[in-house]
Image (tube, grey):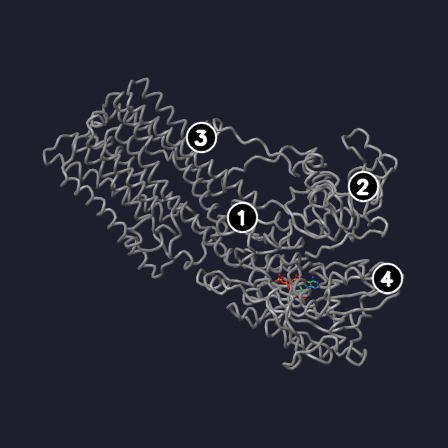
Amino acid sequence: MSERQPGWAVQLSAASADSVSAPSGDAAAERVPGTADAVAWHTLPAEQVLSRLQVNGRAGLGPDEVGARRERSGLNCLPAAPPRPAWRRFLQQFNNILIHVLLGSALITAVLQHVWDTVVILAVVIANAIIGFVQEGKAEKAMDAIRQMLAPRAAVIRGGKRISIAGEELVPGDIVLLEAGDKVPADLRLLHANRLQVHEAILTGESAPAEKNTGPVSLDAALGDRACMVFSGTLVTCGQATGVVVATATSTQIGRISDLLSGVAPLTTPLVQQMNVLARWLTILILLIAGLLLVYGHFAGHYRFTEIFMVVVGMSVAAIPEGLPAVLTITLAVGVRAMARRNTIVRHLPTIETLGCVSVICTDKTGTLTRNEMMVTSVVTSDFAFTVDGAGYRPEGGMSLADQLIDTSSHPVLAELALVASLCNDAMLSQREDDWKVEGDPMEGALLVFAAKAGIDSEEERRTWTRTDTIPFDARHRFMATLHHNHARQASILVKGAPEQMLGMCSRQRGANGDGELDAGYWRAQVDTLARQGQRVLALASRTVRPEHTVLELADIQGPLTLLGMVAMIDPPRSETLQAIKQCQGAGIVVKMITGDHSGTACAIGHQIGLRNPDKVLTGLDLDAMDDVALKEAVKAVNIFARTSPEHKLRLVMSLQSNGMTVAMTGDGVNDAPALKRADAGIAMGEKGSEAAKEAADLVLADDNFASIVAAVREGRTVYDNIKKVLSWTLPTNAGETMTIVVALLLGITLPVTPIQILWINLITAVTLGIALAFEPTEENTMRRPPRPRQAPLISGALIWHMVLVSILFLCGVYGIFSYALNRGYSVELARTLAVNTLVVMEIFHLFFIRNLYGTSLTWKGVRGTRVVWTTIAAVSLAQLAITYVPALQAVFATQAIAWMDGLLVIGVGMALFAIIEIEKQIRLRLTESKRATPLDE
Ligand code: ATP
């Protein structure tokens, strides 16, 4: 669970907190000289700020008031940079060396008056640009939608109630609650600050967090010295606060200095960038070879210059993988969209690649593996053990003792315990129709429900017992304390927290017959029993203090507390968790639970969700006692770490990484940020996570669900596979086409395909078949393979061998059918038509082969293909039929209609190619004896 425990009410002196309805007649506050600030809010006392903004500090703005103010102030967001105009986006598609070479070729063919060649080359360029343009547009939209999903929210008090709203809905005068990990949503004048520290580097450049308080400062105080103000965009690193919005949107400090929101980040990853660089170098190499061929053909082969020139142009265009950059971008965009559909928002694109290598997932327990829907089921006092009935957050249900319903009024300790549960609590319980909802921490919600079942009216008690000070919950000290006063001049400190922590802070315990010495052994036994059932246990204590005591210090609670009892609550595992963990285990990914909870509870949950080795648990204390060497060894075998604080996460990540593992780590609190940054894939929780954690993370889980992490890993593996498939299809295909021409030139024999025909093949296949692979669904055995080693090269030795093999087979197929046709006495045109169709058919069969890199392609599912695959094949086939049978096109491409028997033969050649490469793959799989070795993987 995170440290999200906002104070729920504005803590002002009685006078300032009361309603202030009219602008006071105070001397007009000074403007800040030389700035556009209408009012120097930092110079005014909090009461005057509220008065000038005409807002009640306790109740906040009413709905009508909010509407009226929004009309005046507009939405609280900075204007986005205007989108790139469509024409510019289109033109940018041509800004690529691969395309420049093609444009150069088009120009030269035009000069040589080979009009049709020019047309076909230009068609390639334009088709490519259109596809790039359309897909990029889609990708930009997807990224925009993702950005919307990440829009920050703000906790405010409106109409007397604490609610959570989108940050952009804030208006001047709104009362905002802040806590550690929050990003400040607007410029606020602080009304109350409790140990508040804010990281303001984006405004002041100061790397250390600034301490904040509520006292006004002088007019000329620099931004960094305005301690009573917090500014939009800065991060709360510690403490809690309440503030009133004084400026929104472009009126905020950040709004004035920052540029427009940055434009769209390019959709790329290091791997894709590398591939684009490779494509560029390949182009240069091709041009070099083309030059050599030109010289060789002209001088040694005695071809006419224009003739050899056209051949070399055709060959170069066929060899250049001009579609590759666009297709790889599409592959990434498809992956990002698929992840968003599965509730994972990718903040940092390169992580998509890393996800496929993840070998260990370190996950929180509460809310990620479990539902975070808690319910108190038992209560233990020093004399009794009660059970609590009910379902969910509905505050209905009885309490029983030894299966007999009891009346809480006859158990004063129980009633006192329930009172502490409701007052030392920041959550709010509300009813919407028949549904009960919790605003705030679900665990505290469960405590409110328990208090209600015990007959406590929390709202009434909160009014009676005003909270005067708070020590907020922090995952490092694992308790929360509040100080309360009532009108009868009574004062109490109330504390709740992790039992081990609390036992050290209590010296006495409350019993039915009065207070006595703390019996720590009894309580530890109770905690163990409850934790072993997978329940989360919390201890509650109190201490009466003198009414003059108004400031809560740590010293006030270290020792003199009286323990009232313990509550235990269930938080069942999510139903999908078990299955997701099994999937990870099948995929060679170790799952480790790192929780702040008790070791007994963690162990029981570990058993329930099927973690390996659930009885071995290391606690934060154990970790502290180990040096790095011991820890490096220990982390291998242990899968549960309990009572850890965020600092332990960082050590664990580093330890796992030193064992050569690729680590995905979840986090939600502000203190989790270092571990999230250090992990290979840092994953923040979208629902309960703080803004600080989200900013540090690579991925954000919209639903906080562990199963979504596993889905993201699956998607990461799919994206990598698809990039590999695109390459494994494109490179050998291009090589095959090129070799067909090179061999003819070198041997000085008749070309089996003419330059314009090779240009045509390049046109119709590169923009159709190549793209189909970007949309390939996840292969069935994707999560039954071990993770890919990080160093595994994309273009492996096996891929190079595949390129060689396919090129040779393409040559055999094309030259085979060409000589078959000539031997049968067909014209050269007809023989070439057969050769062209054979090339295309072989490419189609090669596509079917590539679709299954990790298993056999000879399955019904493989044959059934996908809609994208069949659509592209239909398009290519139609185009082939057109150039083979439509007279006008026959004239352009010098083709002739082929007989259907020969057509079948062409398809037979394709099938033969498929059979050979499939058999080769099967032999490989058998030889390595394990499914994990793939034809193109080592
Ligand atoms: P996870 O780390 O798996 O999300 P967690 O919620 O148990 O689990 P923390 O939020 O670090 O982790 O909480 C650690 C312990 O602190 C809890 O087990 C509980 O005993 C105690 N605790 C949690 N929230 C509060 C709170 N609001 N007030 C007092 N004590 C709390």
- Drawn side of residue 759 relative to residue 524, left or right: left
- Of residues 121 and 320, the one nearer the viewer is 121
Determine the CA span between mark 3 and mark 4: 73 Å
Determine the CA span between mark 4 and mark 1: 50 Å
- Drawn side of residue 6 relative to residue 607, left or right: right
Q: Nearer the viewer, mark 3 or mark 4?
A: 4
Q: Which of marks 1 and 3 is in front?
A: 1
| Quadrant of the image occupied by residue 474 | bottom right
Residues tagged 4 and 1 counted as in contact (Cβ below 8 A): no
On the rendering, which quadrant does ligand 1 occupy? Answer: bottom right
List x then y, in percent, for residue 893.
23, 27
Q: Type of residue at label 4? A: His
The residue that mark 1 highlights is 345
Residues tagged 2 and 1 counted as in contact (Cβ below 8 A): no
| Quadrant of the image occupied by residue 839 | top left
- Of residues 352 and 469, the one nearer the viewer is 469
Few, some or many C-alpha atoms within 10 Å of disc 4 (few <14, some 14-19, many ≥20)? Answer: few
Label 4 residue SS? loop
The residue that mark 2 highlights is 225
Determine the CA span between mark 1 and mark 3: 27 Å
Q: Is residue 511 above or below residue 140?
A: below
Residue at 33% x, 34% y is: 319
Label 1 residue SS? strand
Q: Type of residue at label 1? A: Ile
Residues tagged 2 and 4 counted as in contact (Cβ below 8 A): no
| Quadrant of the image occupied by residue 743 | top left
The residue that mark 4 highlights is 487
Q: In this view, does 442 lie above or below 327?
A: below
| Mark 1 or mark 3, earlier in chain | 3
